[in-house]
Image (cartoon, helix red, strand yellow):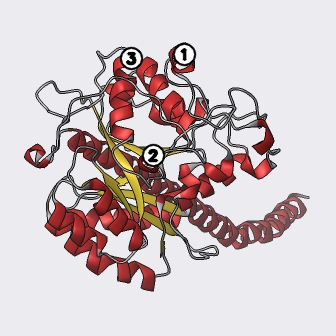
Amino acid sequence: MARRATRATTAKRKKAAPKKSSRKKTAPKKKTGGIGRLMLGGAFVAGTLSAIIAVGSMLELDRASDEFGRAADQSAPNYALAEPEPTPMLRKDYKLSDKASVSERGRTGYLVSDNGQPASEDVQERTGGLSDFVTSPASRKPKRDEDILPGDSGNDGPASAVASADQPWRKYAALTQDTGDKPVIAIVIDDAGLDQPRTARTVDLPGPITISYLPYARDLQSQVNAARNAGHEVMLHMPMEPSSATIDPGPHALLARYDRQKILNEMTWMLDRFDGYVGVNNHMGSKFTADPERMRVVMEVMKSRGLMFLDSRTSADSVGYSTASSFGVPAITRDIFIDDADDAAKIADMLARTENVARKQGFAIAIGHPRDLTIGALRKWIPEIQAKGFVLVPITDVLRRSMQSVTG
């Protein structure tokens, strides 16, 4: 009996062996699963790192852009070339009627009263010089949906905005080719007009580009006419107060200590200096553009004249774009400053950043100045980006795109 028991025990042990062997065979499966999980984890980490790098690049771009904005706020052109004139008492600017004088013809943002005549002085006093465009009853036409700007009800009444077809930002816009779905780039050259030889070299650049003229330069209308004849778009570069009290923004600049009347006086002087511009962007202005109350006065004027506003964003605290939007003023902000460091390598780097922004969001707005290095870099760069599939456009083309994306 003892032998049988021993054999039975042995047999049981022999039967258990295959199970042990079977477990060994499953070991490679565990190993395979570990590799798969490792590969999946690696892919996740790689994706996370890519996202972090992308976010970091955009944050770095924003940081560099704001840094260049602050530099722009401290850069002053040679005001010795300016043509400072006394600021006149506020006078109303009206859209020309058929009976307007020859000297008044063609003035940007001119407004008319209900009877087609320039509004009377008592109307100007009641409205603070800012009554909106009013057409004669016979000339009023219903607005189409595509003509109504954000913030505009589309109702023609005693305080309606400039009719769409007559808005200077549309009327004086430079022609744009059909770009399809290609990324577009708008180059804006600020501080134009003071240094006439360099401004003329800017006009000779392949375009269309947008050239923004300081209002106190000499011979402005002839300079502007040359730019428009060359196919470029024109803006008014309006000086505004910077944060630093030691920096001079130039003659007739808008200062944060000014009351409403003084702001209106200075704006009237600047906006009357020349004709044919689509809108305004700020020269310096880190202090003034951060003041909501005073920027509201600016946007009332912009709205009444049918002008667009480009926020140069010389400060992260600027309320220019948001205030313009609340008034229904067509507005947009710049993306890149090209050359506030007058250095060839840095200019090349910022132009490369401009391309990256255009690839990512479909458009980019880059601001530069009429300087030798900048003009030389743009003359070489513009044909290069066109060969890469980018399209150079005026600022109003980018504005239309942004408005379409907002309105759907």
For the point 59% across and 75% down, the residue is: 179
Tell me where residue 236 appears, x and y as whole percent.
37, 47
Residue 385 to residue 138: above or below: below
Q: Residues within 10 Å of mark 2 (few under 14, many from 20)?
A: some
Q: Confirm or deny contact between disc 2 and disc 3 (CB under 8 A).
A: no
Regarding residue 313, the answer to whether it shows in the image is: no
| Residue 19 visible in the snapshot | yes
Q: Which mark is residue 187?
A: none
The residue under label 2 is 104
Determine which of the numbered discs, if any, sits on residue 261 in the image. 3
Rendered position, 145 above or below 289? below
- Earlier-in-chain disc, 2 versus 3: 2
Task: Measuring from the top left, give residue 13's x and y in whole percent.
Answer: 79, 64
Answer whether labels 1 and 3 touch (C-beta < 8 Å).
no
- Tell me if 110 is positioned left or right of 401 in this view: left
**What crowding class fits label 3: few (fewer than 14 Cα within 10 Å), some (14-19), or many (20 or more)?**
some
Disc 2 versus disc 3: distance between alpha carbons? Answer: 23 Å
Dot 2: element: helix
Q: Position of residue 40 (x, y in %)?
A: 61, 62
Judge by depth and name the residue closer to the eye, 293 or 97.
97
Q: Which is nearer the N-term, disc 2 or disc 1? A: 2
Res. 154 image quadrant? top right
Reading the image, the residue beneath label 1 is 122
Q: Residues within 10 Å of mark 1 (few under 14, many from 20)?
A: few
Label 2 amino acid?
Glu
